Image (cartoon, rainbow, N blue to C red):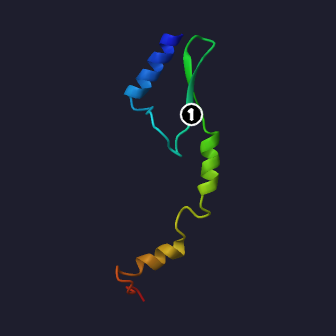
């Protein structure tokens, strides 16, 4: 079992799926658990990440349409291009 866990972990690291980080607000804890079939399954706990995302979520992540029109109607100096 331990050999399977190490193989799965090493394969994921080689493929760039997993990467060890010191600390990141965007990381989530991952563990490997055995299946009933003898294979292994990677599990990720996103609860802390979801809590963080609720704190930083903006009410309007995309710009509002009127802001886009305003920005597109002006040049880099702020002068109005369209009338």
The spot of residue 76 in percent (x, y) is 34, 79
Q: Count neighbours of disc 1 (C-alpha within 10 A) and say few if under 14, some if 14 to 19, many if 20 or more.
A: few
The residue depicted at 53 percent of the width and 46 percent of the height is 25
- In front of the other: 30 or 21: 21
Q: In this view, does 24 lie above or below 14?
A: below
Q: Mark 1 points at which residue?
A: 29
Q: Which quarter of the figure has residue 30?
A: top right
- In front of the other: 9 or 39: 9
The residue depicted at 44 percent of the width and 32 percent of the height is 17
The residue depicted at 57 percent of the width and 26 percent of the height is 31
The spot of residue 7 in percent (x, y) is 44, 16
Looking at the rendering, in which quadrant would you find the C terminus? Answer: bottom left
Image label count? 1
Q: Which quarter of the figure has residue 50?
A: top right
The spot of residue 12 in percent (x, y) is 44, 26
At mark 1, the secondary structure is: strand
Q: In this view, does 10 lie above or below 49?
A: above
Residue closest to the far front: 22
Looking at the rendering, in which quadrant would you find the N terminus? Answer: top right
The residue depicted at 52 percent of the width and 40 percent of the height is 27
Q: Is residue 24 above or below residue 62?
A: above
Q: In this view, does 55 lie above or below 32?
A: below
Residue closest to the far left: 76
- Determine whether, in the image, residue 46 is placed left or right of residue 10: right
The spot of residue 58 in percent (x, y) is 59, 61
């Amino acid at each position: 079992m331990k050999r399977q866990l190490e193989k799965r972990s090493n394969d994921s690291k080689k493929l760039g799926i997993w990467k060890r980080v010191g600390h990141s607000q965007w990381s989530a804890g991952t563990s490997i658990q055995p299946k009933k079939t003898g294979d292994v399954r990677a599990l990720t706990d996103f609860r802390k990440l979801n809590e963080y995302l609720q704190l930083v979520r903006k009410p309007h992540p995309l710009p509002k349409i009127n802001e886009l029109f305003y920005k597109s109607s002006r040049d880099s100096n702020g002068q109005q291009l369209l009338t």
